[in-house]
Image: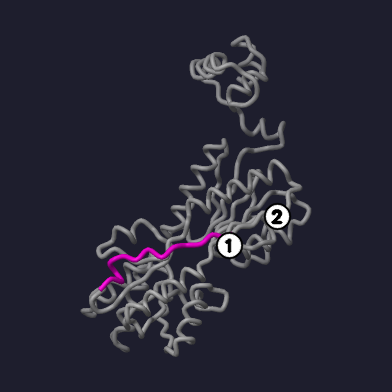
Amino acid sequence: MNIIEFADKIGVSRTTVSRAIHGTGRISPATRTMVLKRMEELGYHPNHVARALVTGQSHVVSLWSRCLHHLFYTQVVYYVGAELEASGFDMIIKDVTSCMNTYNGYTDQLLRWSVDGVLAIDCPQYVTAYVKANQNRSIPIVSFGAFHTEQVDSVGCDLASGSTDAMHHLYEIGCRRIAYLALYKAINPNEPKWNAYKKFMDEAGLKTECIVTPEETRVAARQATSDYVKDHGAPDAIFCHCDDLVTGVFHGLRDQNFHVPEDVVLVGCDGTEDAEYFNPSITTIVQPVKEMCTLACQFMHNRIEDPSLPLQHVVLKPRLAIRQSSTR
């Protein structure tokens, strides 16, 4: 049955049913309880597609992400999902790398479904491409994460400062041979962690060392680390591009009979739960992921309610969590 038939059947107006379902407008607790109970008894389910056609709102938000296999992005999905559910929104997750091999074209693939807003984590190039190709569409977009664009509302995380803190920590505990391990694509001038590492090493008069992985996986990190230390000896410390790679690096060192932290110190980035509960626990740059997701959702709600708002921008600071992997 549709909403009109259901309202007639239980003796209330369509507006009352709508208010009971969505928890909005003037309706007594007793009436809302009655409506929800009768919905369950009669098996009535709201038609959200029909509602979207009438109101122009789908109450669905698209989360754009990449590298969804990484634990950090799993956290993002969890926190964004919780925020959206609390405000009555559903979520569609879109892996941007799966829908466009080149972000300069085929941008329509990013929004195949009607949504009220977009939250884009660490994929500013896709946001830029979409905005450029759809200048007449006014869907609210929030770009957030360490990689973001201020063309739209944004919530950033300053990983350059966090990486500098990590490098100071390694230097202070006596490390002078400090290697940077990352996917080959991540060693470039647009990468804040790499820039902070290189800048620190140059200013300290130390030689940069790169351990390059062909893929951003634990298996690749293990093999790259094992091969590197076999050929070049073990550095004093390895600064890993992300926490997911640290466990691979740890086992790569063990394969060559080096131990953490006795022989080699390890530092990661992101602040995943696995880093804290690994043995030894991993020193890492902790991104304020929950706060980042909360603010991104709030910025999106603000934009939906008032499209004329000035652009909203904030940059958050990460913190360095010093743990067993860098304690001697």
Nearer the observer, disc 2 or disc 1?
2
Q: Is residue 322 magenta?
A: yes
Compared to residue 27, the image places residue 65 above or below, namely: below
Q: Position of residue 223 (x, y in %)?
A: 33, 76
Residues shaded magenta: 315-328
Identified by mark 2, the residue type is Leu
Quarter that holds the C terminus: bottom left
Compared to residue 286, the image places residue 136 above or below, namely: above
- Judged from the image, the secondary structure of the residue bearing numbered disc 2 is loop
Residue 191: assigned label: none
For label 1, the crowd category at 10 Å Cα-Cα, with few meaning under 14, some 14 to 19 and many 20 or more, is many
Quarter that holds the N terminus: top right
Compared to residue 200, the image places residue 139 above or below, namely: above
Identified by mark 1, the residue type is Cys
Q: Is residue 41 magenta?
A: no
Q: Position of residue 228 (x, y in %)?
A: 33, 83
Residue 123: assigned label: 1
Instruction: Calculate the distance from the C-alpha at mark 2 to the C-alpha at mark 1.
Output: 18 Å
Residue 311: assigned label: 2
